[in-house]
Amino acid sequence: MKYGKLIFWMLLVSASLYSQSEEDKISVATYRTIYSDVLDEERTIAVALPIGYAHSDKLYPVFYMLDAEYASFASEIGLVHFLSEYQIPEMLIVGVLNTNRNRDMWSHEIEGLSNTSDNGADNFMNFFAEELIPFIDQNYRTTKHRTIYGRSGAGHFVTYCLLANPDLFDDYLVSSPVIGFSDNQLLTRAEDFFQTHTSLPKSFYIYYGDTDYNSVVERIPRLETIIRDNTPEGFKWGVKRVAGGHGPPESLYELLRLLYSDWTPVARPVITPSKGELLEGDSIIVHIDGSHDPILYTLNGDEPTRNSTRYSAPITIFKSTTIKAKSIRGDLQEGSTSSAEFLTIDKHRTAQNVTDLKPGLKYTYFEKQTFNIPDNIPEPPKKAGIAPSIDIGLRERDQFYILQFDGFIKIPQSGRYRLTIISNASIVFLDDQLISSDHGLEPTEKIQEICLEKGFHSIRIISSVLTEQIHQLDFFWEGPGITTQKIPASALYHQ
């Protein structure tokens, strides 16, 4: 891992460029000031919103970072934004700038170190508990999950917070924490703490260099022994010692990877069917799957929240309804919303009055690069003909092609039909209405239920592939007297 290149690139991507005129500025955080009665001074913080914060109503966990006036803070914001794509949850970042670092970070008076006292860290901790955290929670959309990160002397403060007020944060991350100089006060406190706490659902991770300060390399192994000998139930912790000096530059990256070593993104729920029609007095049974996390849903089109109904069993729809569903993983992350619309109609979709039909579908095949699937292709095809069935095997290469099928599907009996399209890049029209659109790299399944009159209904399928490794285009139906199966060649016609 080339950490320098990684951090530089993440700094670039950390800015959300919603507008790009000449006068716009790229910024990664916003400075705010609050007056602290606890500290009797004005404090400056830097708030970096998650990517997409302004375009959603999600709640986010908060990541508090100390020493935010340092130049590395901007790149660390970019790092968190970069990792939040797939490897950690999205987080609102709060950087806390220093006014008197020695006063705030040290838990006791240290001989020879100015401005240290026996209540400095306690006051700073109270500033978090009584003023800063409430301010952030009142002004931003936050969950109750909080993480704090500090390096060197700030790592001392983070460690002290764990031992003095463990409920203040959920995760404690430290890089080269200075546990002590010529004293063992913090180690003594740690020994008493871990001997008396049998249960502690918190996380604590340490990262430091093997040529670090003596106050780090000599004391962290002792702290490790204390924790290992008295590990509370539910306590997640780890220590990583690497080649290097004090506060290795890759510390935050490695600590976040330790904290979220088994993280997987919250999946978007799959609503089946994803669309449907029902006649008056009819009903549709809807399933919501595809996520290991709790699924919350609404039936009125509103965005699901933590207070919405939790999905536990199939839902029966009797009237026009818009279902929205999302997965929420505790206080860590909200997933993306899925939606499905169901409409009450007064009659089946009318069959088309067509004659002189012949078996099979017309197909046209093009070899071209396109990033959007076109409804129609005006240029001449490379080849064309009649296909007995919907067959993607008619392609002559595995990338940069478009394959289009046109014709009619014969509906044997009026009723509601369950149509399933599995593809990785296609659009499907039935009776000149778009019923399915997929533009992914991997095949996805789209299921909908449509009320169709007996007879012939026009169909157009356009599949376009750029560089996907998997090529799939399958069309299934299920309806009155028909079990789930691929639409047979006997039901496909053309003029």
Image (cartoon, helix red, strand yellow):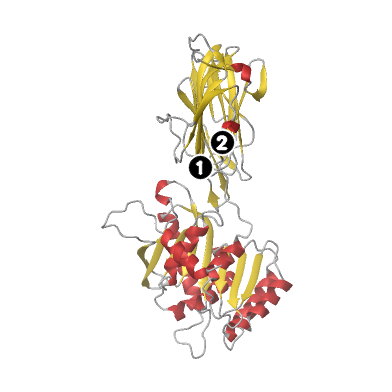
Residue that badge 1 annotates: 466
Residue that badge 2 annotates: 396
The outermost residue toward the bottom is 112
Which badge, 1 or 2, is on the more N-terminal residue? 2
Residue kind at label 2, given as amino acid type: Glu
Quadrant where the image shows the N terminus:
bottom right
The 10 Å Cα crowd at callout 2, few under 14, some 14 to 19, many 20 or more, is few
Does residue 113 appear to the left or right of 273 in the view shown?
Answer: left
The number of numbered badges drawn on the structure is: 2
Q: Secondary structure at mark 1?
A: loop
Tell me, yes or no, whether the two marked residues, 1 and 2, touch with CB atoms within 8 Å: no
Nearer to us in this view, 313 or 258: 258
Look at the picture and state if 454 lies above or below 153: above
The outermost residue toward the front is 382
Look at the picture and state if 310 lies above or below 52: above
Residue 412 picture location, percent across and down: 60, 12
Residue 457 picture location, percent across and down: 51, 16
